[in-house]
Amino acid sequence: MDFWQAFAAETGAKGPFIDRYPAPMPDGSCLILPLRDYGEIAVAGFIANQAAIVVAQRIGHWMARAASDLGAEVVVGLPTLGQVFAPLVAQALGHANWVAPGWSRKRWYDDALSVEASSSTAPANRRLWLDPRLLPRLAGRRVLLVDDVISTGTSALAGVALLERAGVRPVALLVAMAQGDRWRAGWPGDMPVRAAFATPLFDRTIGGWLPRAGTAPMELCPLFGS
């Protein structure tokens, strides 16, 4: 639980990395992330609801800045970890509220406002639900979909599908971290993705893991170099 509790000074380390990776942040600091061994590759992990509050707040601020030009009128936060950042982003954008889909079905929910969802970190599929009473918040408005991480893209695509069932097409997806580029092949070409920061995929090597060149989608992170 030493991870995600504070920002650190950037070291410029290039690897090999053994069990952690210093992910560069927009302000020149870094956040030490654990490396998750997926066999042929490793990824940098980030569990937002285990992060220190000040860490989540600063990342949420960067996310809002990264999306400030999109004209979003409503923020929809995907459960579970996207909902760490959705209220922070909504507040920073000047919104009075936000929309929270969920995993549990209430008595008044409608099957038509649900989709099956999967995640690269979850062992089984489940259903994502939208409260029909929230439809007036979405109707005719520019909706920004918020999640914690995009990795394979499956959970974010479920969020897009759920909103389409509500008659809404998000103007963009906003995430805290773009985790490599495995999601690109299946992502809609007409929907922008913005991120506060990005991390590469890692290949196994002698002594640990090396970042795979070209897999950290930094072009999604407008605050870097600004």
Image (cartoon, helix red, strand yellow):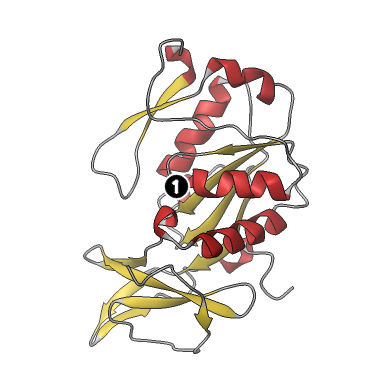
Residue 40: quarter of image: bottom left
Residue 126 in the figure: left or right of residue 69 = left
Residue 200: quarter of image: bottom left
Q: Element under label 1?
A: loop
Report x, y in % for residue 56: 53, 59
Q: 138 or 194, which lies in front?
A: 138
Report x, y in % for residue 37: 25, 66
Q: Is residue 143 above or below residue 33?
A: above
Residue 102: quarter of image: top left
Q: Amino acid at mark 1?
A: Leu
Q: Which residue is mark 1?
A: 81
Q: Residue at x 41, y 61 (%)?
A: 46
Q: Residue at x 46, y 60 (%)?
A: 181
Q: Quadrant of the C terminus?
A: bottom right
Residue 106 in the figure: left or right of residue 222 = left
Report x, y in % for residue 95: 73, 39
Q: Is residue 76 above or below residue 105?
A: below
Q: 143 or 57, which lies in front?
A: 57
Q: Residue at x 45, y 52 (%)?
A: 183
Q: 201 or 23, which lies in front?
A: 23
Q: 75 or 37, which lies in front?
A: 75
Looking at the image, the residue that sits furthest to the front is: 53
Q: Quadrant of the N terminus?
A: bottom left
Does residue 189 appear in the picture of this structure?
no
User: How many circles with numbers are drawn on the protein?
Assistant: 1
Q: Residue at x 35, y 66 (%)?
A: 43
Does residue 105 appear in the picture of this structure?
yes
Residue 27 in the figure: left or right of residue 215 = right
Label 1 CA crowd tier, 10 Å (few <14, some 14–19, many 20+)? some
Report x, y in % for residue 3: 38, 70
